Amino acid sequence: MNMSRLISLFFQGSLVKRIAVGLVLGILVALITPMLQPTLGFNLAEKVGVLGQIFVRSLRAVAPLLIFVLVMAAIANKKVGSKTSMKSIIVLYLVGTFLAALVAVIAGFLFPTEVALSVKEDISAAPKGVGTVLLDLIFNMVDNPLNALFRANFIGVLTWSIGLGLALRHASDATKTVISDISEAVSKIVYVVISFAPIGVFGLVSETLADKGLVALGGYIQLLSVLVGSMLFVAFVVNPVLVFWKIRRNPYPLVWTCLRESGVTAFFTRSSAANIPVNINLAKRLNLDEETYSVSIPLGATINMAGAAITITILTLAAVHTLGIQVSFGSAILLSLVASLCACGASGVAGGSLLLIPLACSLFGISDDVAAQMIGVGFIIGILQDSTETALNSSTDVLFTAAACIADEDKK
């Protein structure tokens, strides 16, 4: 394969196919790096891994600005009396997250898992109670708008963009046109960033597999199997049932499209926040209502956390089984509710759900020291757990948005 052919594979045609090329090349680089390192004198996978880091940082950099202008423009230009599907989408988000936690509870009891609690991890950043999570949520909402943009505080960005959008509903048509033009300009920048996804995936896969490989997961195969199995069950059974309930037709073409075009990039970026531009681009290509998806996608990256709910539940139950604690049915249901609430408070960055495990563990009187060790276990298996979790979380954002929009369109 000559160089021009390779370049065309990366920049032309289907994005999914180009990402697949990047994935394969990344695996090849990870495999040959140990053999080439003595000759080259440096770690090849580590060098190309910089490409992945640049890609992820680019997505994270553009996402807050994109959400700010897109939501503000959508609300400011919303026609009086027009309806959106937000109510249905929020119901799907909350029900989907709770059902995911319930599936995790059932899986945790069907396949009880014990782990060797020997990992020490600092949990100073972990919240100590549900009240703390709610208070942090309020603080994020009233954050300084510039600070919210700089820190990628999406709750704060969303709050200010909605507020400004509502205020600008009364602005002149010329002002609304300028806001729309700015929104389009930022969207074009996002399109350029997303076009580099194959190169980003190439770098991410090369560095990750060369650095950790799959050897580190050997001692946690059962725990990882229960986690990933629960997420796959939610992705291919629970979510399709919810989508069918809304659109009353075969849900799997839509489910597969969202997993393929949103889940793949989310799997490698491991950040719901970084995948927001990808989801908005997909929603646009699905011809969904812009007034709806411009709000529902960033909102979903914050509160639609089925994967996080599964992670919190499974790892908490692993600690419970390891310590020999008896759990009643009522306690299991309570765990599902708490895990759902915790998941909604999970940050949109890699590993964000792990810091909320102590909160769920506190239900069963498990000490912070043990909960900290479970966080450590989570980081060990994070190479697959966090990637799968983010793929489920992010792809479900656009899936539920599409389902609600299609259902409302069918009613017209």
Image: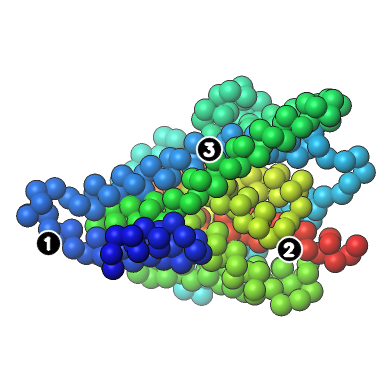
- The residue at 78%/26% (across/down) is 175
Tell whether 254 sits left or right of 367.
Answer: right
Q: Amino acid at mark 2?
A: Ala
> From this viewpoint, which residue is outermost toward the right?
81
Q: Which residue is mark 2?
A: 403
Q: Could you tell me if residue 343 is visible in this image?
A: no
Task: Give the numbered dot on residue 221.
Answer: none
Q: Which mark is first along the chain, 2 or 1?
A: 1
Q: Which residue is mark 1?
A: 35
Q: Which residue is mark 3?
A: 62
Give the image location of residue 197, x and y in percent.
44, 53
Q: Check disc 1 and report its element: helix, strand or loop.
A: helix
Q: Are marks 1 and 3 in contact (CB under 8 Å)?
A: no
Can you say whether 62 is above or below 280 in the image? above
Tell whether 237 sits left or right of 112.
Answer: right
Corner quadrant of residue 152: top right
Q: Amino acid at mark 1?
A: Met
Q: Which mark is first along the chain, 3 or 1?
A: 1
What whole-number distance in Å separates the C-alpha atoms at marks 1 and 2? 49 Å
Number of residues whose C-alpha sits closer than 10 Å to that of mark 2, classed few (under 14), some (14–19) or many (20 or more): many
Which numbered disc, 1 or 2, marks the residue closer to the eye? 1
318 or 228, which is in the foreground?
228
